[in-house]
Image (cartoon, rainbow, N blue to C red):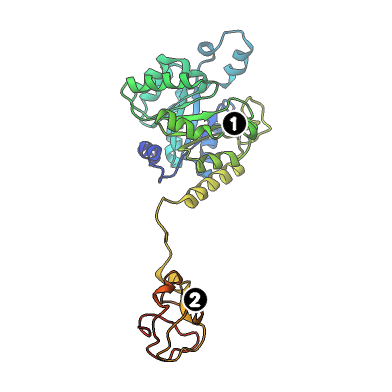
């Protein structure tokens, strides 16, 4: 088991920890185990936490003889490859996960030690037996909300909880391929978290790297992004997926944003005492002040000095007498007034 696979629940529920980034290989491996493993290595090299696949049988998913069947049948993942894919993920230092589209696929995932989360694709949110089976594995569940109503989401979440599985994340998703930035509606990320009381995230189908970055800034705990070796390849999911270079840039951008967000804390955040000292401002004499003279406000000014009376406390000096001769630019404080 990889490090990320043992930390999914913590990463989902603690905003101080990095968001989980899933590289969605899906069916973009071209029916080749060798290509699938190469894509796992690419996803890992880009800095993603998980490589994700889809497990379906076209015969069980759509009507035989339909156009959808002709498209999906060549894209099926050979189920006997799963141990090899899990092993490749672990060798690359990342987690393996998948979207099962039937209960047999759920059972298959449950028999392997590799998977540590199950992703429910948007069209399967209505498949409550599938959701219940996934929840009973006790693995964290990530569901997408594309094409769903708020009521649909609530029903799915209730099913997961009824099966005793407390760890679930709901991804905002727009089921347009590709999704234009104007249609991304990232405000849903916060709304989902607030409405349903679960961590939220983004399943992004835009061809951009900026959209997932913005999602993390808005509180997304999971980012799912389709990946490809080459956008020009044939297939339904290549044209909007990220190639290796942009994928790496997206991951780096997300991690930089997380660093910039920091933690909620009172000022000063982490400035050293030395830095604060050299930028401190305090009251100094605006002119020479002889001993015994009563100090007025116009005799004082503000300059950068390491110690002294702060400008906001000027009234603590006004009306006092100079105890010594105070030179111009000399600090005026309790030591030379009284």
Q: Between residue 77 and residue 268, name the one nearer to us.
A: 268
Compared with 44, 109 (above or below) is above
Quadrant of res 293: bottom left
Residue 278 visible at all: yes
User: Do callouts 2 and 1 mark residues in contact (Cβ within 8 Å)?
Assistant: no
Relative to 252, does residue 133 appear above or below in the rendering? Answer: above
Task: State which mark lies toward you, 2 or 1.
Answer: 2
Say which of 143 and 111 sits in front: 143
Q: Nearer the viewer, residue 236 or 190?
A: 190
**Residue drawn at point x = 43 percent, y = 42 percent:** 93
Give coordinates of residue 272: x percent, y percent. 41, 67
Q: What residue is shown with label 2?
A: 304
Helix, strand or loop status at disc 1 = loop
> Count the marks: how many?
2
Q: Residues within 10 Å of mark 2 (few under 14, many from 20)?
A: some
How far across and how far down the image is residue 67, in percent? 64, 12
Q: Secondary structure at mark 2?
A: strand
Tell me the number on the disc at residue 205. Answer: 1
Q: Quadrant of the N terminus?
A: top left
Q: Would residue 105 be found to the left or right of residue 181 on screen?
A: left
Q: Position of residue 280 (x, y in %)?
A: 46, 72
Residue 229 sits above or below residue 119 on the image: below
Residue 64 picture quarter: top right
Q: Residue at x 42, y 50 (%)?
A: 263
Is residue 84 at least partly visible in the picture? no
What residue is shown at x 44% (from left), y 44% (from top)? 18
State which tag comes first along the sequence, 2 or 1. 1
Q: Which mark, residue 16?
A: none
User: Residue 94, how many percent across, how many down?
Assistant: 44, 39
């Amino acid at each position: 088991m990889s490090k990320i696979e043992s930390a999914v629940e913590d990463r989902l529920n603690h905003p101080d920890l990095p968001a989980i980034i899933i590289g969605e290989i899906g069916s973009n491996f071209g029916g080749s185990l060798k290509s699938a493993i190469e894509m796992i290595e690419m996803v890992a090299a880009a800095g993603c936490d998980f490589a994700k696949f889809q497990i379906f049988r076209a015969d069980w998913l759509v009507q035989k003889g339909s156009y959808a069947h002709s498209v999906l049948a060549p894209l099926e993942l050979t189920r006997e490859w799963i141990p090899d894919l899990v092993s490749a993920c672990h060798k690359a230092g990342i987690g393996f996960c998948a979207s099962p589209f039937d209960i047999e696929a759920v059972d298959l995932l449950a028999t392997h030690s590799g998977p540590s989360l199950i992703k429910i694709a948007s069209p399967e949110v209505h498949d409550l037996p599938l959701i219940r089976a996934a929840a009973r594995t006790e693995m964290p569940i990530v569901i997408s909300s594309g094409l769903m109503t708020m009521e649909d989401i609530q029903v799915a979440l209730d099913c997961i909880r009824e099966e005793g599985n407390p760890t679930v994340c709901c991804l905002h998703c727009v089921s347009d391929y590709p999704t234009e930035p104007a249609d991304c509606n990232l405000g849903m990320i916060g709304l989902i978290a607030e409405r349903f009381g679960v961590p939220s995230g983004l399943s992004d189908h835009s061809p951009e790297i900026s959209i997932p970055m913005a999602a993390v800034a808005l509180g997304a705990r999971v980012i799912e992004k389709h990946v490809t070796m080459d956008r020009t390849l044939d297939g339904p999911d290549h044209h909007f997926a990220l190639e290796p270079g942009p994928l790496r840039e997206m991951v780096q951008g997300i991690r930089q944003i997380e660093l910039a967000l920091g933690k909620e804390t009172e000022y000063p955040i982490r400035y050293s005492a030395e830095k604060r000292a050299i930028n401190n401002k305090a009251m100094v004499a605006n002119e020479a002040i002889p001993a015994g003279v009563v100090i007025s406000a116009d005799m004082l000014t503000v300059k950068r000095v390491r110690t002294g009376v702060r400008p906001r406390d000027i009234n603590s000096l006004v009306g006092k007498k100079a105890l010594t001769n105070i030179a111009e630019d000399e600090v005026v404080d309790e030591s030379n007034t009284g």
